[in-house]
Image (cartoon, rainbow, N blue to C red):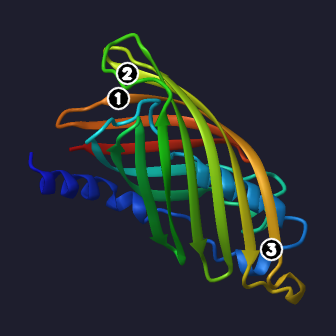
Amino acid sequence: MNFFKKILLLLFIFTPVLTMASSFDGFYNNISKENLPYFAKDLAGMLGASSYSTGRILGWGGFQLSAHGVYVQRLNKNDTALGPRNENKNLFMPLIQGEIGLPFRLDGFIRAISYDGLTLAGGGLKWGITRPRDENYTFQTMLVAMAQAGVHRDFSLTHYSGNLVISFKTPYVTPYIGGGVDYMVLTVEGAKTAALQNKKSYTTTPRGTAGINIKLPMYMDMSLAANFASYGVGYEANLGVRF
């Protein structure tokens, strides 16, 4: 399968996913001084999730294109920024990410989304603490640093995260665990309450991830993971292809 066929297959698989994101329309009418910090924490945790799908870097010359999805079934009990608690729906966030292997055990990556009025772009670096190897029953570790900025009709944000990831390669699957911290500045751009206009929320929140990576045919791989943040438990799915 050539380069363009792989890209088309990846986009075809994830096109339905990219249309499933929940709406942020409730933000304008429901945001308040009390629920703003909790909304910022939940959103920061989702933005920091799914930036990695294993503890191994690509290595010099590698390239990967992947589609990511983060799903939270229930937001924090104090996060009513999108609607009353008894109407608080799940939240889904899709992302497209491209990565390239660089010298000195570094990978660079960029990621972006545009859906439901939210436009987000950013990127970062992955540094392999250990040299990348394909041998079974070996540990791989890496550090991930990322920065993103996003704009919605009713809010804007700047997000930063740092992560430590460890994975263990086996013949069939590669389990991995990671821990990270998300820092975000969220600015209210539109709200029913005039006093909230231009109000900023500065948020720092921890996040953990546990998952497995599965090798697929045609240089593709998939990962499934659970992440743990201010909202409790969320879920991640990633599908990528290496060239």
Q: Which mark is residue 173?
A: 2
Q: Residues within 10 Å of mark 1 (few under 14, many from 20)?
A: some
User: Is residue 240 toward the left or the right of residue 6 in the image?
Assistant: right
Residue at which label 3 appears: 31
User: Is residue 47 toward the left or the right of residue 167 in the image?
Assistant: right
- Give the CA separation, mark 1 to mark 3: 40 Å
- Give the CA separation, mark 2 to mark 1: 5 Å
Asked whether 146 or 116 is in front, the reply is 146
Q: Position of residue 63 (x, y in %)?
A: 28, 46
| Figure quadrant of the N terminus | top left
Pointer 2 with pointer 1, Cβ within 8 A: yes
| Figure quadrant of the C terminus | top left
Identify residue type, mark 1.
Answer: Ile
- Please tell me in which quadrant of the rendered image residue 210 appears: top right
Q: Which residue is drawn at the image coordinates 45% and 32% (left, top)?
A: 54
- Please tell me in which quadrant of the rendered image residue 59 appears: top left
Q: Which residue is drawn at the image coordinates 48% and 37% (left, top)?
A: 127
First of labels 2, 1 by sequence position = 2
First of labels 3, 2 by sequence position = 3
Q: Secondary structure at mark 3?
A: loop
- Give the CA separation, mark 3 to mark 2: 43 Å
Identify residue type, mark 3.
Answer: Ile
Pointer 1 with pointer 3, Cβ within 8 A: no
Identify residue type, mark 2.
Answer: Val
First of labels 1, 3 by sequence position = 3
Q: Position of residue 222 (x, y in %)?
A: 35, 37
Q: Position of residue 2 (x, y in %)?
A: 9, 49
Residue at which label 1 appears: 214
Asked whether 75 or 3 is in front, the reply is 3
Q: Which residue is drawn at the image coordinates 37% and 21% (left, top)?
A: 173
Q: Is residue 51 above or below residue 159?
A: above
Q: Residue furthest front?
A: 104
